[in-house]
Image (spheres, rainbow, N blue to C red):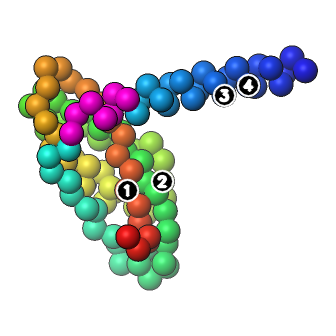
Amino acid sequence: MRRWVLSIFAFLLLFACVATAQTAESSRKVKTKVVPVEPELARKLKLVAVVKVQVTIAPNGAVQQAKPLGGHPLLIGPSLDAAKQFRYEAADSTTTAVIEFHFGVDN
């Protein structure tokens, strides 16, 4: 019983952290989005995946740093390249955001 209560507490704590990250992410609007180039091998394999990239945004809106948070290894490189080309609205301080790239999904 105690383990179950601790599990729920950990889940709620994690959910609160995720909710905070989403709020911080939405505070700066994207001015320029770049679509990653899908590698030929991924296209041939009909790979369907999501790659998450955390970006650090400078006060002028340029992406200073991009770090992969998860996704297929074949798609991380193109996702990082695209994320580094994103541009955001200017702000007073450096902020972070999480970008999701969806591959192999017809939108």
Quadrant position of the N terminus in the picture: top right
Labels 2 & 1 near each other (Cβ < 8 A): yes
Q: Residue 85, can we see it?
A: no
Q: CA distance from mark 1 to mark 4?
A: 30 Å
Q: Which residue is mark 2?
A: 71
The mark nearer the N terminus, 1 or 3, is: 3
Q: Which mark is residue 101?
A: 1
Residue 44 forms part of the magenta stretch: no
Q: Residue 74, can we see it?
A: yes
Residue mark closest to the camera, 2 vs 4? 4
Labels 3 & 4 near each other (Cβ < 8 A): yes
The mark nearer the N terminus, 2 or 4, is: 4
Residue mark closest to the camera, 3 vs 2? 3
Q: Residue at x 48, y 29 (%)?
A: 19
Magenta residues, start to end: 23-29
Crowd rating for badge 3 (residues with CA inside 10 Å; few <14, some 14–19, many 20+): few
Residue 27 forms part of the magenta stretch: yes
The mark nearer the N terminus, 1 or 4, is: 4
Q: CA distance from mark 2 to mark 4?
A: 26 Å
